[in-house]
């Protein structure tokens, strides 16, 4: 059921916004096929095809219904296919310099299957878990792109993914970007949110906090089946300036399913205003920053600032600050009972010892607060509160130091780390390396990890030690075909052995 904050009528946009239940990506595929048939007399298109196959075999320990420990086997096979079709437009469209009105099509598909007992023995019937599927095909992206139309407009139609410093989402629809003058770009986009319940859709992009597999009528599980229109816009300052900035607005809403008397017709699932920017000075100072204000919940839920300074060629200093308050779908109860916020402050120093070796040193301090609406983690972390009240918080801290070497035929890296404070302590090290046995034909790699920790509130044995080893190989059969192999094993206090295997086949084809 929608939360009162999410399902309030005054902030609902007019139902004039169209929500098409058929994924726009499917329409794009049909359009591209029709264009290909119609344009047979024109010069041939250019294609780039990439195929990747990943096989995994491992086991996971769990407690069975009787309370006894048992192992679940996983035998996963995942295949990725990426297709690019470009130079679709007639040559006469490209302008005098050949840089106008370019048209291309991009497609990414993933097929995932699991032949292990983890899914073969999954619950069925009334106990079925809808999120567990043995076979699934996802269209990750599929869009038709028209770039530099008239020298000013970029248009993208279909299933597309957006990500920046503080935002990550996917939708089926249209995205238009218009360059205004020399430095300003205006953007408008709209469509429907990509969700796992839609055909050929991956669930990784949808807003967290709700589950379509709920069987409790009090949670209104039918609400998960509602189509969610998404609209937004942005203004950006870019075009090769030393300073870039973007301000964006996004809203996701849906109709109220099985509405009871007094319920609004529509409610808001997500509404935010985000700001991102970057700047650089003389190739020595680099700054990136981003912040997102959650209009639905009325507080900042993501703030990030990073600064990197190159000093005298061989030295590099970095500083990072991040504040994160987890937020969820407007229909989710986790907005009330979710975990609190945390603020994180980091500093780093890199030194170039020679043309091959570099040394690095890192440190961090992190503060946790119980209520994300009380932005007092600033004060807890920096020892000076920015609000008029204090809230108890806890801290964690730690750091690492190491060496990184890169040569013509390989590389090696050593890291030593230690952490303490809230949650317990952790201490360990990691050594990894890679060498080209036959350059451009065969590479071998290996890893050794040793670490120990003590977690607060854990039963005996409280002190845990784990040793992990891994070996891998890359065999390049040709320029367009590569095979990756990886095997690893973890052993320690809780496990005698955790053996895993991974195989990847990559094929790149250009026509």
Image (cartoon, helix red, strand yellow):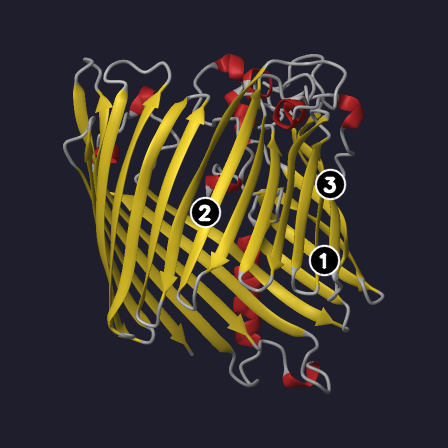
> Looking at the rendering, which quadrant does residue 478 occupy?
bottom left
Image side of residue 494 versus residue 180, left or right: left
489 w.r.t. 486: above or below: above
- How far separated are the C-alphas under marks 1 and 2? 25 Å
Please, what secondary structure does the residue beneath circle 1 have?
A: strand
Question: At which x and y percent is residue 403?
Answer: 38, 53
Image side of residue 200 versus residue 178, left or right: left
Please, what secondary structure does the residue beneath circle 3 have?
A: loop
Crowd around label 3: few <14 · some 14–19 · many ≥20 (10 Å): few
> Looking at the rendering, which quadrant does residue 301 occupy?
top right
Crowd around label 1: few <14 · some 14–19 · many ≥20 (10 Å): some
Question: At which x and y percent is residue 254?
Answer: 65, 31
From the image, tell me which residue sits under label 2. Answer: 200
Residue closer to the observer: 315 or 73: 315
From the image, tell me which residue sits under label 1. Answer: 176
> Can see residue 115?
no
Question: At which x and y percent is residue 355?
Answer: 43, 69
Pointers 3 and 2 in contact (C-beta within 8 Å): no
- Could you tell me which residue is drawn at 64 percent across and 49 percent down? 307
Image side of residue 417 versus residue 9, left or right: left
Residue closer to the observer: 160 or 461: 461
> Looking at the rendering, which quadrant does residue 387 occupy?
top right
Crowd around label 2: few <14 · some 14–19 · many ≥20 (10 Å): many
- Could you tell me which residue is drawn at 27 percent across and 42 percent down? 449
> Can see residue 49?
yes
From the image, tell me which residue sits under label 3. Answer: 17
């Amino acid at each position: 059921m929608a939360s009162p904050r999410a399902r309030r009528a005054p902030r609902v946009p007019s139902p004039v916004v169209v929500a098409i239940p058929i994924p726009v990506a499917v329409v794009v595929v049909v359009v591209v096929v029709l264009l290909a048939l119609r344009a047979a007399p024109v010069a041939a298109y250019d294609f780039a095809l990439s195929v990747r196959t990943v096989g995994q075999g491992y086991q996971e320990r769990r407690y069975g219904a009787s309370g006894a420990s048992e192992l679940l086997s996983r035998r996963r096979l995942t295949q990725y296919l990426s297709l690019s079709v470009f130079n679709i437009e007639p040559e006469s469209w490209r302008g005098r310099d050949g840089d106008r009105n370019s048209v291309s099509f991009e497609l990414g598909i993933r097929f995932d299957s699991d032949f292990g007992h983890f899914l073969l023995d999954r619950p069925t019937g009334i106990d079925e878990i809808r999120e567990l599927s043995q076979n699934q095909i996802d269209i990750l992206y599929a869009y038709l792109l028209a770039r530099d139309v008239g020298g000013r407009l970029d248009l993208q139609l279909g299933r597309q993914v957006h990500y920046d410093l503080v935002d990550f989402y996917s939708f089926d629809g249209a995205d238009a970007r218009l360059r205004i003058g020399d430095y300003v770009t205006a953007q408008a986009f709209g469509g429907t949110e990509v969700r796992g319940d839609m055909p050929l859709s991956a669930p990784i992009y949808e807003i967290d906090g709700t589950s379509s597999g709920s069987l409790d009528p009090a949670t209104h599980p039918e609400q998960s089946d509602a189509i969610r229109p998404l609209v937004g816009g942005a203004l950006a300052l870019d075009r090769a300036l030393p300073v870039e900035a973007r301000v964006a607005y996004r809203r996701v809403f849906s109709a109220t399913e099985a509405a009871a008397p007094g319920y609004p017709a529509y409610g808001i699932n997500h509404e935010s205003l985000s700001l991102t920017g970057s700047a650089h000075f003389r190739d020595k100072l680099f700054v990136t920053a981003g912040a997102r204000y959650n209009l639905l919940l009325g507080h900042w839920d993501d703030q990030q600032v990073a600064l990197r300074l190159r000093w005298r060629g061989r030295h590099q200093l970095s500083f990072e600050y991040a504040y994160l308050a987890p937020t969820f779908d407007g229909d989710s109860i986790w907005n009330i009972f979710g975990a609190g916020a945390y603020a994180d402050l980091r500093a780093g120093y890199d030194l170039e010892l020679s043309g091959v070796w570099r040394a690095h040193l890192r440190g961090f301090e992190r503060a946790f607060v119980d209520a994300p609406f009380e932005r007092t983690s600033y004060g807890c972390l920096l020892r000076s509160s920015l609000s008029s009240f204090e809230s108890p918080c806890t801290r964690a801290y730690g750091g690492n130091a190491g060496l990184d070497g890169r040569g013509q035929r390989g590389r090696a890296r050593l890291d030593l780390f230690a952490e303490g404070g809230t949650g317990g302590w952790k201490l360990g090290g990691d050594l990894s390396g890679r060498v080209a046995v036959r350059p451009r034909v065969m590479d071998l790699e290996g890893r050794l990890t040793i670490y120990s920790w003590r977690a607060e509130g854990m039963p005996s044995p409280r002190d845990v030690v784990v040793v992990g080893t891994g070996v891998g190989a890359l065999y390049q059969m040709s320029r367009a075909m590569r095979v990756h192999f990886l095997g690893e094993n973890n052993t320690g206090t809780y496990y005698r052995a955790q053996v895993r295997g991974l195989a990847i086949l990559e094929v790149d084809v250009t026509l």
